[in-house]
Amino acid sequence: MNNKVEVPNHIGLIMDGNGRWAQERGFARTIGHKTAVATLKDLCIYMADLGVRYASLYAFSTENFKRDNKEVDFLMNLFMNVFNKEFNFVKEKKIRVLFSGRREPLPNNVLKSMDKIVEETKNNNDLVLNICLNYGSHAEIIDTAKKLCNMYKNGEIELKDITEDFFQRNLYHDLPPIDYVIRTSGELRLSNFMMYQASYAEFYFPKVYFPDFNRKEFDKALEEYNNRDRRFGGIK
Ligand code: IPE
Ligand code: IPE
Ligand code: MG
């Protein structure tokens, strides 16, 4: 391997293990979510500085609504506060924020904080942060299929227009494929995260819980990425 470290163009980050991080320290799970915010902020700044162009962050899955109301309410409030008060760094770092996921049944105050940050950062073009909130791959693929059916019904497209490229561009956002999926906490699954976009991604499953996934851990992830041999079905 040469010394120049290649940075993935699009990183998918499944930020898992907040609850266990807190529980192992005798704290309430909510403390883990709070600590994760500080970790995430620093990581975003680091990714921007390293020249990562796209980062998709799994913040809340469509399945996470199965958790008890208290935890869901806590998370919704946390999201709102973070987007309203703790996301000044995105403006300083010229980061553009997008959201992927269904708006229903997110509370209005959360939706308002999301819309505001999207509007305020829409002209930024360094790192694109795609925050997956109330996100599920199944929902995304179904929603895209419905969108294309409506376009067809309205005579805007013909069947032959539905190519892989066209389908991809009509997902929640027109993003490049994910190169590297990192899931913290040692779980070896996708949990409904960006299945379409991650079809040729490399995967990395560090054991550390997300609140401990600092710059040093990120460097280790990058080193591992640089050892991978990506072939995309071809021969090398
Ligand atoms: C990830 O941490 C954050 C969300 C899913 C919102 P968890 O809350 O899943 O933490 P663990 O996996 O239970 O430790
Ligand atoms: C996936 O983590 C969702 C997020 C990290 C936001 P979960 O903790 O919800 O996933 P499972 O339930 O362990 O598969
Ligand atoms: Mg979890």
Image (cartoon, rainbow, N blue to C red):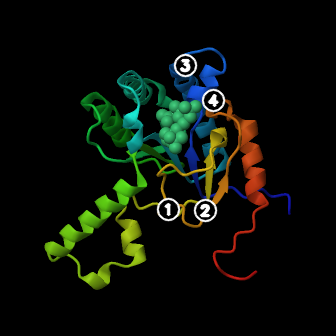
Amino acid identity at mark 4: Pro
Element type at mark 2: loop
- Please tell me which residue is depicted at 73% across the width and 48% down the height of the picture: 221
Residue closer to the observer: 99 or 187: 187
Amino acid identity at mark 2: Ala
- The residue singled out by tag 3 in the image is 31
Amino acid identity at mark 1: Gln
Q: If the picture is divided into quarters, which one holds ligand 3?
A: top right
User: Mark 2: few, some, or many residues within 10 Å (few <14, many ≥20)?
Assistant: some
- The residue singled out by tag 4 in the image is 211
- The residue singled out by tag 2 in the image is 201
Residue closer to the observer: 115 or 37: 37
Q: In which quarter of the image is the C terminus?
A: bottom right
Q: In which quarter of the image is the N terminus?
A: bottom right
Badges 1 and 4: C-beta atoms under 8 Å apart? no
x and y percent of residue 77 in the render? 38, 23
User: Mark 4: few, some, or many residues within 10 Å (few <14, many ≥20)?
Assistant: many
